[in-house]
Amino acid sequence: MSVPLKHIIGEREMENVHLAVEEEDLYSGYNDYNPTFDSEELENDVGFQQAVRTSHGRRPPMTAKFPGTAIGARPLASSFGSRMPLASSMGRPMTGAVQDGAARPMTAVRAAGYTSSLTRGSTFDPLGQSKGPAPPLEAKNEDTPEEKIKILEKKVNDLIEESCMAQSMGSLQLALEKAKEAGRKERMLVRQREQSGNADHINLDLTYSVLLNLANQYANNEMYPEALNSYQVIVKNKMFSNSGRLKVNMANIYFKQKNYPKAIKFYRMALDQISNAHKEMRIKIMQNIGVVFVRMGQYSDAITSFEHIMSESPNIKTGFNLILCYYAIGDRERMKKAFQKLISVPLGIDDEDKYIPSNDDTSSNMVIEAIKNDALHQMERDLKVLAEKYIMTSAKLIAPAIETSFATGFDWCVDMVKSSQYVELANDLEINKAITYLRQRDFNQVSAVETLKTFEKKDSRVKSAAATNLSFLYFLEKDYDHADRYADLAMNADRYNPAALVNKGNTVFVKQDYEKAAEFYKEALRNDSSCTEALYNLGLTYKKLNRLEEALDCFLKLHAILRNSAQVMYQLAHLYELLEDPQQAIEWLMQVISVTPTDPQALAKLGELHDGEGDKSQAFQYYYESFRYFPSNIDVIEWLGAYYIETQFCEKAIQYFERATLIQPTQVKWQLMVASCYRRSGNYQKALETYQDIHRKFPDNVECLRFLVRLGTDMGLKEVQEYATKLKKVEKMKELREQRVKSGREGSARGRREGREGSAGSAGTSEVDVKAVSQSETKQLSPLLDSGRDSGHSSNSTKGERLSAKVRSLPGSNEPYEASSPKELDASYVDPLGPQMERPKTGAKKRVEDDDFADEELGDDLLPE
């Protein structure tokens, strides 16, 4: 009974132990493994043995990638107490083993990055960084022939690229030098290949590039014979494919040399060697052939080429050239047909509405904003402007030829344009029709004004252009009210139109509101900084306001834009004169003379400045040159006559005063000066005859009678008593007139003292009126005169009074004749023109100032050019 008891106790103890291990042993299961990995049973595994004998067995073993593992080095124990054969017949372990009917997933034999060698002191290095840096690359041996050839090829390519870059930057000489250097290097390369035995591997593309670049650089430097030789080398080499196209380049060179027959020959040779697949290239060559025929005057052959192009691939330039050829041969009907073809040429341009953003889609609006001013849209705009330019030019050219009158022909062109894709251009054509009338100086043409007035109700752009031209037209006619009205209309239609602002400033200027005029000119410059008319007029306005430094700044800026404008340089000279810097004024006038060497007024001004500096000889030279080009300037004639009297050459002064007598026959002073010169030179008989002639024309002239009495007394003439009686009578009448004037002044003295202030005001008003009249008489097309010019209109009366005073200062008849000569000379000719700075400024600016107010030119805002 004791054994069973022990057995029962043992079972209970084992049960208790088992339960204790199952609940408390945390490290159980680490020695378990899948029986699939049992290598000792592989010999008995049928599937594995079959795999070894088939192709699956020839695959690299899976365990080869993991050296150092100990799967096969020890038997694998299993907690299940039994060993199971491998179930795979494909040479790979199963994904799991079946235990008690439940599938268990297979786990990795080792953790990622873990090897059993870790226990033996190796470090964790999955990337292999412990091996150190990679060994350096093996240096190339540049002494080998292959390496030398490669280096030389690279140098040649670099030289070609540098040559092209230099050409693009405008350094043509440097580009040619680089091209020559590339040619030398390329020949060295060919010799090295031949020496190394690689002559069969010559780089033909590199040779072609070197020769072509060299030929192009020769042509760019206008070394045409060398360029032709280089092209000829390429063309004659049969190894170069498509080299026949270069005959186009050779033809272009012959065209530049004006060797037109040779140019046509090479163009046709190039055309024969280009296949029909390259249609665009063939069209361009045929266009060049047509242009050469035009240069040769063979319009029929040119028409043949252009007509073929218009039938195959029409374009704007060819259509325009075709119209020119028809116009040259005078074919009216074909001109009309060509014009219709021209306006029907498709441009391939998208509608401008494409670039108008919509309010809904933000992303599309951003895209439109990005492409609105990109290079492609700019190219489209340029193409459209070019097409409009050719159409406008064609219409102006053929309008008088296709019909009996210019107006009828232009109307036909306008009707054709209205029915084409260039509907907007019809308005510009009608405005251009009116402008053509104006440029023909047909200002009274009613149709021109009426045509412009019809655009008052059109869209803003056309309305502004028409109103601008109308304002200019009325301004020239001095109808300032209408000019102001249409200037306002143009500004309201387009406030950013600089031409309208300039015309508005002009109308304000003539009303002497200079501050307001300056504001309009400034606004025009803000809208268009290149508006030279606004800048010029602004300078004149500042000069009127006596703001000379600001005026000088305006004209210096304008001179930087218009380097050869004589008007601008003259204004600069006048400003420096006003600023009392005569040397600078002389330098600027010398520049004016360099541009217009035959300008008599600029020469006279130079003489005046040199005279003011005391350089009489230089002044005489410029005054004489001025007289040679314009022998009717009274100021110049007077100075030259006075100069010869001062230098005691009275005989030479006579011809100048006689010239003045012819110009102003009613002025007695010039005839008196002629007689005085005869008297001073000792020719008393001729002087007497001259005084007698003056007395017949001017019987009441006191000075003439006095000299007649003196000469008659000295020469013992019988008419002396008659002349003396007349002299007394004239002097008595003169005294009576002076007494009446004196009594009248004394009687009105009190009234004048009382109304002095009012009289001063009225006198000022009358002076302004006189100046306004003198401006309108002197100014022809331009109403604006610069400062100092008004005084020039009263120069004749001023000088007449001065010369009369000189004559009145002569001695009486009772004085000796010899003593009177030096006294008269001192009184009359010490400085015949008066002080230099006070001399009225007349004539010297007439040519320049006749156009000193730069009005807006007709149609500048309409024509494409």
Image: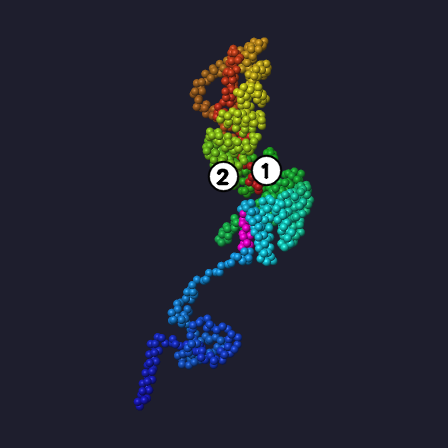
Please state which of residues 168 and 807 is positioned toward the viewer in this rendering: 168
Q: Residue at x 54, y 19 (%)?
A: 648
The residue positioned 63% from the left and 38% from the top of the image is 407
- In the picture provided, is 592 more to the left or to the right than 315? left
Q: In which quadrant will I find the N terminus? A: bottom left
Q: Is residue 305 magenta?
A: no
Closer to us: 240 or 640: 240
| Residue identified by numbered label 2 | 525
Residue 435: image tag: 1
Foreground pick, 461 / 519: 519
**Type of residue at label 2?**
Leu
Q: Which mark is residue 398?
A: none
The image shows residue 106 at horizontal and vertical percentages of 43, 74
Query: Residue 826's x, y, as percent?
Result: 50, 18
- Residue type of the residue flagged with mark 1: Ile
Closer to us: 357 or 601: 601
Which residue is painted at 49% across and 54% down in the image?
A: 363
Position above or below: 308 against 473 = below
Pointer 1 or 2: first along the chain = 1
Where on the picture, by quarter, is residue 387?
Answer: top right
Disc 1 is placed on an element classified as helix
Q: In front: mark 1 or mark 2?
A: 2
Is residue 157 part of the magenta span, yes or no?
yes
Range of magenta residues = 150-167
SS state under label 2: helix
